[in-house]
Image (cartoon, grey):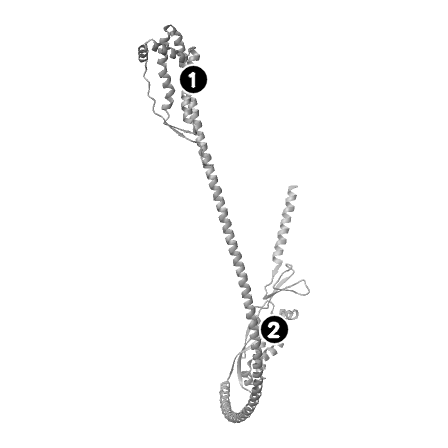
Amino acid sequence: MPEEYMKYVIGGGIVLAIIIFIGIISYIKAPPDIAYIISGIRKKPKILIGRAGLRIPFFERVDKLMIRQISIDIKSEGYIPTQDFIGVDVDAVAKVRVMTDPEGIQVAMRNFLNMNEKQIEQAIVDSLQGNMREIIGTITLKEICNDRKKFGDEVQSKAQTDMNALGINIISCNIQRVTDERELINALGQDNMSRIQKDAAIAKAEADRDVEIARAEAAKAANDAKVASDTEIAIKQNELAIKQSELKEAADNKQAIADAAYKIQQEGQRKTIEITAANADIARREKEAELAEREITLQERRLDAEIRKKADAEKYAAERRAEADLITRQKDAEAKRYEQEQQAAGIRARGEAEAEAIRLKALAEAEGIDKKAEAMKKYGEAAMVEMIMKALPEIAKNVAEPLTKVDKITMYGDGNNTKLISDIVNTTTQVSEGLTQSMGIDLKSLLSAFVGGKMAGGNTGALAQAMNANAVETTPVAPVSIDTTDDTSDEE
């Protein structure tokens, strides 16, 4: 099975290669300047120009036909007599090309198939030369020299008939050179030059004559025209002067009428202007007076408004200042009163606190004395008096000691200094009353009885000795400045 498969593959590859090879050798592409003719099994050959095609290998062939433009030199190769029996040698160039129309290319295929440019030139040059020789014999030398284009066109037209039979199209035919065997062309040129010079001289003389005649005629015509013009001008000027005079007279009349009318109109306008000006002046003055009255009214209103506004402002400012001063005085009085009340309350509070402290201290000391008194009852009244006399300086010291710490006492109100002294005395009295209540002894009665008895018995010396013996050192009390001020004030 694999061997058979390989045989098929190989066979198919060979067939494909053959097809590709045949395709390669069958494909034909013709350029634009060469026609490819495929012939063989077809009734009519297939022509390819600038396109591609296929041919059947081994059964069809491909031939080439050059269809590009070819330049061919045409020479007479000797002096050929013209119609006027002057031998000339002509050299021309013809541009030809193979016909590409269906009929022309069929003819060209039979004559020029597979030929190159040189071969085609050799095949048609003889026919072109023969046609040019025939044309030379039908025209004169002067015609050849004077109109070479006509000569070339005649050669092309005559030769094209023969070229149609060959399948060639003559594009153009140009005469390059013409010579003759006797140099008659140069003679014709000289003769022509002399004739031209003669004709030119005659023409110049005739032109000069014509110029002089024309100039004279022009001068005569100019003079006649000038005379006629001057005459016409004089007539026209005279007519113009007459016309101007008439026009001036008419214009003067119209001007006089216009001036009169203008003066009348000007006078009327002047009156109108004066009346209008007077009315305008009256109206202006009335307007000025009205404006002045309005200005005065506005000025009075403005001044009234400014004065009233200023007075209101000053009044308002004065009221505000008075209110501010009153509030300031009230605030100052309240602040001063509050400060005085605070100072008095502070002093009173300090005095009460100190008095309470003294009282408590005195009570404590009195309790100690009470205990001492119980122990000393056995000593009798003399011993008790001695003890009391010994304690009194200490009591007075303690009562007066707070005053040593005060530099100055300012008291407000009537009777405050009396009240201060009364407070101090009351404090001392409270101490003595405390002793009386705690010891059960009437200190005042005891002292009075003791002092009275001793004095009656003549024993005053013993009391003095006892007081001296029991005397204690006391601290002097610094003087205190007491400033009493009445707290009443005139301020509200």
For label 1, the residue is 430
Between 434 and 117, the residue placed more toward the observer is 434
Query: Percent position (x, y) of residue 324?
Result: 48, 41
Between 306 and 85, the residue placed more toward the observer is 306
Between 400 and 64, the residue placed more toward the observer is 400
Query: Percent position (x, y) of residue 265?
Result: 58, 80
| Viewer can see residue 249 | yes
Q: SS for tag 1?
A: helix
For label 2, the residue is 169
CA gap between label 1 and label 2 equals 176 Å
Q: Badge 2: how crowded within 10 Å, few (<14), some, or many (20+)?
A: many
* Residue at the (61%, 57%) spot, across then down: 25
Between 385 and 124, the residue placed more toward the observer is 385
Amino acid on which disc 1 is placed: Gln
Q: Is residue 14 left or right of residue 331?
A: right
Q: Based on the displayed image, in which of its 4 quarters is residue 244 positioned?
A: bottom right
Quarter in which the N terminus is drawn: top right
- 386, above or below 281, in the image: above
Q: Badge 1: how crowded within 10 Å, few (<14), some, or many (20+)?
A: some
Amino acid on which disc 2 is placed: Asn
Count the numbered circles shown: 2
Q: Is residue 86 left or right of residue 22?
A: left
* Residue at the (61%, 78%) spot, across then down: 157
Q: SS for tag 2?
A: strand
Query: Percent position (x, y) of residue 431?
Result: 41, 16
